[in-house]
Every structure is written in structure tokens, then in C-alpha cells.
Image (spheres, rainbow, N blue to C red):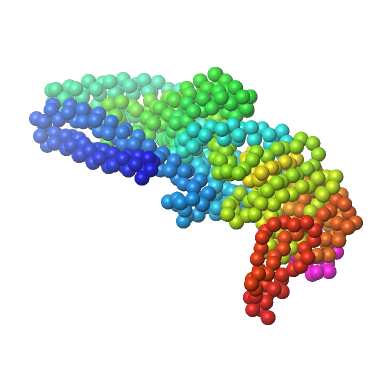
């Protein structure tokens, strides 16, 4: 067994023991409070003892919660280690499982469907370690960025490579961020901050005085058996509490626990790490956690989070009915903490959402850095500030780990601007397009790419890789493609664009497909875009004879022992043969 396995087993065993002791003490306390109801002579003995046992009971609860959190941490850390083993196809306890991205992404960018980014064992499934909403939204923004300058890509890469270098701490931070899920809604939290909890009133002071009198009556009844006075005191407390609740809206503070507690626990867990990380980033002039890089910003964060953690924790006591009931019998607990919460609201509103945004960026970029660590043969891409160039050597698809053959590519605005790829069915044309697109997307996010060399300008990536009809808009497959190609053309006229088009105009007849493709390419070549188009029309290859900016390459199969064999290597020139009839014959269609 590994060290992590042993720790998991040991902690689970301790939790079971604590659970048994907690149950035993709970029952004893219950009986210590019930027996004096029937036998008053035991009051002076059992009630004081019950308070001692209650203190021990509270410690047991605290220790059990602490151990459960640690167990969850170990389990999440174990899962994080297994993800990497799974990616590398090494023996793993979860090697038979598929990673599935569980969240929904509201993006109109067709690249999500074209590259299957949200499907199992693909980009988002491996990226999304923490399952937190704000981090997912930030990752989505990285993918959906419209036109990103070379400077922005370099800044992202600086941040990711900085986090990538934190090998000893990166998994710890990711695990801590996963420990308490951030599924709270910013809009809902903002609505809570805008609600008035307290109106000017002296009722809380009156309530404290009444509780003080109740303490006196309690001790009087305890030593002199004056029960009527004690009962009268309880009635007065209930009456004053009801009147106070009209001015101090205790019930309005209840949603704060559900909405803020989990997030505050996350922030408290990583507070010290945020400080260290922000300082380290600041020394290297990396704009990560910028608010935390100043001493004043860090101190404000620590103060507010400490106070918010204290308030939500105190209000959360109501979840334990025994302790909550005992506390409220002696002190106006909810009223006090609602007053403290009301005083804290303004300071929370000032910077809370800025903190969440910067931590969401950190969380997202940590996941990008963790994914980059999976690429043993990956490199940091070089971003070219000027011109339009794409140079790729031995590029592979990041998520086809054992099935993708390395290929290379050079595109420039002076020559080799448009690559026409012809080839046999199933020979690797579409996979190559997806390989280029996926790695370019990783570059845009600031990640490593899977290649021996990767150099690119800051292109906008546009794709047309899948064809579907649209029942909602009554579009045929062909018309849907026409609209997609028009969008690509507009993007290419607008600025530097990398276009990847698979089997152009496949939805129409041979004659019109050839004529349409030729005219579209003639127009496309005059834009600021460069890219790749695959086709089965071998006649299109002749366009390279009259335009030096167009060049041909191909994928092809060969027949060995009556079977088709593919090497998936891209070769120069147009494809010398096709295999459609051979595929039909082998499948018995004729």
C-alpha cells in the first residue's frame, strides 16, 4: 500500500472511534438533563456534570469534523494523483473510468462542439479538477477569448509557468480549493449584502439586561427551588426576543450561513498560501493575485475573512439543536451575531467579489498548470508579436495519447498561406485539424503544447469541423455550413485568423462543391487569415499550380494482406489515390 493509502485507512479508523465516543457522551448528557426532571435531588449534581461533559462533547465534535475534512482532503489528493496516472495510461485504480465534465457551459463558440471540449476524456474533463463554478467560468473565458493579443497570451503563459514551477505546492492548493465547493451565486450573495438586517434600536441592550435578570432567577431557582420566578423569566425573555426580532431581523441572517460558509472556509484554508504566493508573484512582477500583493490588501482580507468565518460559524451553531438550545437559554446568541454581521456587511461588499475573481483566476490557471504537467514531451509555445506565422514540429493531439502520430506544419503570410490536404478516408485528415486546433487553444490559454517546437502569431482560432442541421432555425446541413464559412471569411477579413475547415462543402453535389470551393478559396486567400482546408476533391489540388500561397499535402493508406493500413503521416503533394470503393467492397456493399 502507498503512503496515501495508509493515511486514508488510519484516518478512517480514528473517525469511527470518535463517532462511537461522541454517541456515548451525547446519550449520557441527555440522561443527565432528563433525570432531574423526575428526581429534583439530582439537579445540583447532574447539571454541573452535564456542562463538563458538554465541553468534552464539543471537543469530540470539533475533532471529528477536523478529521473528516482531513480525510476528504486525502481522498481528493488521491484522486488528483490518479488523474495523471489515467492520462498517462499507467496502472491506476480509476484506469477503467472515464473523466466526464459535469458542468454545463453557456457558450456560443462553435469550437466547443467542433473539438468536443466538454466530452469525456477531453480538455474540460481533464482541466476541471476543482468543480467550482467561478473557476469554470474563467476557464470558459480563456477558451472563448475573441481576439487575444500576443501580450495577453504571454502574460497568461507567465502566470501558468510560474504556477507550473510550484511543483510541491500546486496539488496541495488544488486539493484545498476542492475541499469546499464554491457553488454560491454572486447575484444571490450581493442581494444578501443589500438587505437591511438591523434598524436603529436599543432593544438588544434591553434583551441583554433581561437575560442578566434571567441568570439571577436561574441561580435563585437552582439554589432555592423558586421555579415560578424562573418560568416567569423565560416568558419575559420570549416576549422581549419577539419584539427585538422586529428590529433585528435574525431570520434574514440565516441564508448567510448556506451562502457564505463554504466559500469562507475555502478562503480561510488557503489564506496563508495566498499570501506566500502573492508575495512570490510580486517579486517576479507577475500580475497574479494583485490585490494580495500589497500589505494593506492582505491585512484587510485576513481581517474580513476571519470575522466572516467567526460570524457564519456562530450562526451555524443552530444546526446542532442541543448546543443551540442550551446557548439560547442563557444568551441572545442570534441577535448578537446578526448585529456583528450587519456591521461587517459594508467591508465585505467593498472587496469580497474582487477577491473571489482573483482567486477564481488562480484556481483556473492552477488547473491549466496541472494539465501542462501531464505533457512529458510538451513545450512552452513561442508567441510571435509581428507578422502571421505558424510553425509546428512533431505536434500531437494532447488527448489521443497513444494513437496520434507526430506531424509538422509551416504556414506563413508570404508563402504557404493555405494548406490543402487531400487523402483517403480514415487516414488522419480530420484528426490533424483537431490536433492543430487543440494545441493552438492550449497556447491561447497559456498552457504547454504537445510538440517539439511551437511558434505562432496571436491568431483568432475559427473552425468548421462538424456539420449539423438546425431544426430550431430550419437550416439544412449545407446551409448551416455556408453560414459557418461566411463567419470564417468575415473573421479573416477582420484580422489575423487561423482557420481550419474539414471537407469543405461536403453537403452538396460534386460539380457545385468544386466550383464553390475554388471561388471561396480564391476569396479566402486575399484575407488576413491562414490555415488548412481538407477535401476529397482531388481537382482542388490544381489551385496550387496557379497560386504560390496555396500548397498541397496528403494522408494516404496502403493495402497489406488485403487490409488497409494507415501510417497517419502527412506527406507532400496531392493524394495519389482514394479508398472509398475499397472500403465499400471490404464491408460487402458490392
Can residue 114 be seen at all in this image of the molecule?
Answer: no
Q: Is residue 513 magenta?
A: yes
Residue 583 to residue 232: above or below = below
Q: Residue furthest bottom?
A: 590
Where residue 406 appears, as percent x and y from the top left, is 66, 51
Where residue 528 appears, as percent x and y from the top left, is 82, 45
Q: Quadrant of residue 179?
A: top left
What residue is rendered at 75% in x and 44% in y?
390
Answer with left or right where residue 134 lies relative to residue 14: right
So how many labels did they put on this image? 0
What residue is rendered at 25% in x and 40% in y?
17
Between 379 and 484, the one nearer to me in the picture: 379
Q: Residue furthest front?
A: 561
The boundaries of the magenta stretch are 505-516
Can residue 11 be seen at all in this image of the molecule?
Answer: yes
Where residue 221 appears, as percent x and y from the top left, is 16, 25
Question: Which quarter of the image is occupied by the C terminus?
Answer: bottom right
Amino acid at each position: 500500500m502507498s503512503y496515501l493509502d495508509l493515511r486514508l485507512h488510519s484516518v478512517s479508523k480514528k473517525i469511527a472511534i470518535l463517532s462511537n465516543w461522541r454517541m456515548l457522551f451525547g446519550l449520557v448528557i441527555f440522561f443527565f438533563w432528563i433525570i432531574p426532571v423526575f428526581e429534583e435531588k439530582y439537579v445540583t449534581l447532574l447539571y454541573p456534570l452535564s456542562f463538563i461533559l458538554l465541553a468534552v462533547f464539543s471537543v469530540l465534535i470539533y475533532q471529528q469534523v477536523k478529521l473528516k475534512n482531513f480525510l476528504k482532503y486525502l481522498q481528493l489528493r488521491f484522486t488528483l494523483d490518479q488523474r495523471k496516472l489515467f492520462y498517462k495510461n499507467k496502472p491506476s485504480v480509476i484506469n477503467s473510468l472515464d473523466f466526464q465534465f459535469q458542468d454545463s457551459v453557456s457558450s456560443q463558440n462553435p469550437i466547443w462542439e467542433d473539438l468536443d471540449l466538454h466530452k469525456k476524456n477531453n480538455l474540460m474533463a481533464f482541466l476541471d479538477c476543482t468543480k467550482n463554478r467561478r473557476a469554470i467560468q474563467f476557464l470558459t473565458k480563456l477558451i472563448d477569448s475573441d481576439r487575444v493579443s500576443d501580450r495577453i497570451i504571454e502574460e497568461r503563459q507567465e502566470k501558468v509557468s510560474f504556477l507550473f514551477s510550484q511543483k510541491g505546492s500546486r496539488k496541495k492548493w488544488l486539493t484545498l480549493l476542492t475541499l469546499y465547493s464554491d457553488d454560491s451565486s454572486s447575484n444571490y450573495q450581493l442581494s444578501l449584502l443589500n438587505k437591511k438586517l438591523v434598524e436603529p434600536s436599543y432593544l438588544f441592550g434591553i434583551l441583554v439586561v433581561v437575560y442578566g435578570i434571567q441568570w439571577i432567577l436561574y441561580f435563585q431557582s437552582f439554589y432555592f427551588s423558586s421555579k415560578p420566578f424562573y418560568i416567569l423569566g423565560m416568558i419575559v425573555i420570549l416576549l422581549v426576543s419577539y419584539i427585538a426580532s422586529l428590529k433585528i431581523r435574525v431570520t434574514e441572517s440565516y441564508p448567510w450561513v448556506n451562502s457564505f460558509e463554504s466559500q469562507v472556509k475555502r478562503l480561510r484554508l488557503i489564506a496563508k498560501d495566498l499570501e506566500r504566493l502573492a508575495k512570490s508573484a510580486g517579486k517576479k512582477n507577475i500580475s497574479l493575485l494583485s490585490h494580495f500583493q500589497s500589505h494593506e490588501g492582505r491585512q484587510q482580507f485576513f481581517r474580513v475573512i476571519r470575522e466572516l468565518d467567526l460570524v457564519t460559524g456562530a450562526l451555524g451553531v443552530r444546526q446542532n439543536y442541543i448546543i443551540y438550545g442550551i446557548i439560547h437559554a442563557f444568551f441572545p446568541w442570534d441577535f448578537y451575531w446578526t448585529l456583528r454581521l450587519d456591521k461587517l456587511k459594508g467591508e465585505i461588499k467593498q472587496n469580497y467579489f474582487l477577491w473571489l475573481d482573483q482567486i477564481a483566476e488562480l484556481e483556473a490557471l492552477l488547473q491549466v498548470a496541472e494539465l501542462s504537467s501531464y505533457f512529458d514531451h510538451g513545450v512552452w509555445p513561442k508567441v510571435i508579436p509581428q507578422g502571421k506565422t505558424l510553425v509546428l514540429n512533431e505536434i500531437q493531439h494532447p488527448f489521443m495519447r497513444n494513437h496520434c502520430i507526430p506531424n509538422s506544419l509551416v504556414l506563413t503570410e508570404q508563402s504557404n498561406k493555405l494548406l490543402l490536404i487531400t487523402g483517403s478516408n480514415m487516414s488522419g485528415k480530420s484528426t490533424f485539424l483537431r490536433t492543430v486546433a487543440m494545441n493552438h487553444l492550449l497556447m491561447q490559454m497559456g498552457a504547454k503544447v504537445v510538440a517539439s517546437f511551437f511558434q505562432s502569431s496571436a491568431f483568432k482560432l475559427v473552425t468548421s469541423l462538424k456539420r449539423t442541421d438546425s431544426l430550431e432555425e430550419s437550416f439544412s446541413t449545407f446551409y448551416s455550413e455556408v453560414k459557418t464559412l461566411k463567419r470564417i471569411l468575415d473573421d479573416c477579413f477582420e484580422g489575423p485568423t487561423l482557420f481550419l475547415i474539414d471537407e469543405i462543402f461536403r453537403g452538396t453535389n460534386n460539380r457545385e462543391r468544386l466550383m464553390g470551393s475554388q471561388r471561396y478559396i480564391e476569396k479566402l486567400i486575399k484575407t488576413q487569415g491562414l490555415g488548412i482546408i481538407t477535401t476529397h476533391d482531388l481537382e482542388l489540388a490544381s489551385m496550387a499550380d496557379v497560386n504560390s500561397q496555396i500548397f498541397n499535402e496528403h494522408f494516404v493508406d496502403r493495402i497489406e494482406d488485403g487490409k488497409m493500413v494507415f501510417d497517419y503521416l502527412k506527406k507532400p503533394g496531392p493524394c495519389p489515390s482514394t479508398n472509398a470503393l475499397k472500403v465499400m467492397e471490404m464491408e460487402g456493399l458490392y
